[in-house]
Image (tube, grey):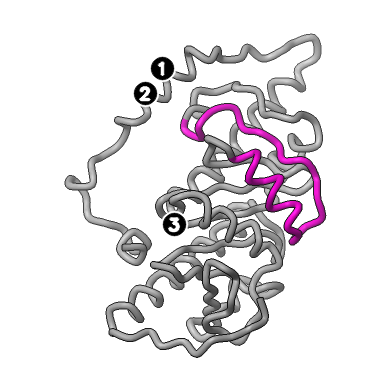
Amino acid sequence: MTEQRQHTPGRDTAHGALARAWDALVETARRTVTDGLVVGTSGNVSARVGDTVLVTPSGVPYDRLRPADAVGVALDGTRLFGALTPTSELPMHLEIYRTTGARAVVHTHAVHATAVSTLVTELPPVHYMTAALGGPVRVAPYALYGTDELAANMLTALRDRTACLLQNHGTVAYGDTLAQAYDRTAQLEWMCRLWLTATSVPGGAPSLLTPQQLAEAGGKLKGYGQTDAARPASEDERAAR
């Protein structure tokens, strides 16, 4: 993990793709702070461009990140470029990229989601957006942050899912773009807040959706929104190509 290779971006197009992806990554990381999903330097964000994984560095406030602070690693964790130390949660990010088609990963310490992770082993399906994450969101058993054990627990919880909770820790979500990974993170936090609110009513219990209802919602959600041909690509979508 500490070995460093000489980075030669090659063609200007490859270098430009990395630069655009880094800008989009920093913007997404700053948004997690603005939207209250992380406090200080907690949480981390990554994006895959080809076989290079760009990651936020460890312990650096997102508002201080500059283009020169870009950190890139290979899928095996070998440092490709960047003087700063990668996030301590690099094992989680790399496991997702090695085992899924993810192009972006967002990890936060969102307060409602973290609270739920201490109460249940799976977030009950209180809303149809559960289907957008692949089904009821599982909670990965606790393990020390930054460890291979945590990465393995997370991977099990993510089976057939695009997001999970980390017990007494936070959230992980991935997607085809940074925007999608972030949206899934925000949706998960909102559903956790919804469930906590519903269960806080004395004498009441929230109604839950059935597997059939979730399947119906999932089918309908696949056709939700605009087709790619109907709208221009975003900055992070272009960078990920």
Q: Which mark is residue 216?
A: 1
Magenta-span inclusion, residue 146 = yes
Q: Which residue is mark 2?
A: 219
Tell me whether the residue at label 2 lies in contact with that at label 1, contact meaning CB atoms closer than 8 angstroms: yes
Q: Residue at x 45, y 19 (%)?
A: 215
Instruction: Tell me where residue 114 appears, x and y as whole percent.
Output: 74, 42
Disc 3 residue type (three-letter)? Arg
In this rendering, which labeled residue sits more in front, label 3 or label 1? 3
Q: Residue at x 70, y 66 (%)?
A: 41
> As displayed, is residue 186 above or below residue 12?
above
Magenta-span inclusion, residue 75 = no
Q: Which residue is mark 3?
A: 103
Tell me whether the residue at label 3 lies in contact with that at label 1, contact meaning CB atoms closer than 8 angstroms: no
Q: Is residue 77 left or right of residue 10?
A: right
Disc 1 residue type (three-letter)? Glu
Disc 2 residue type (three-letter)? Gly
Q: Give SS at disc 3.
A: loop
For marks 3 and 1, give the CA distance. 27 Å
For marks 2 and 1, give the CA distance. 5 Å
Q: Is residue 11 left or right of residue 183?
A: left
Q: Give SS at disc 1.
A: helix
Question: Over which residues does the magenta segment extend?
Answer: 132-158
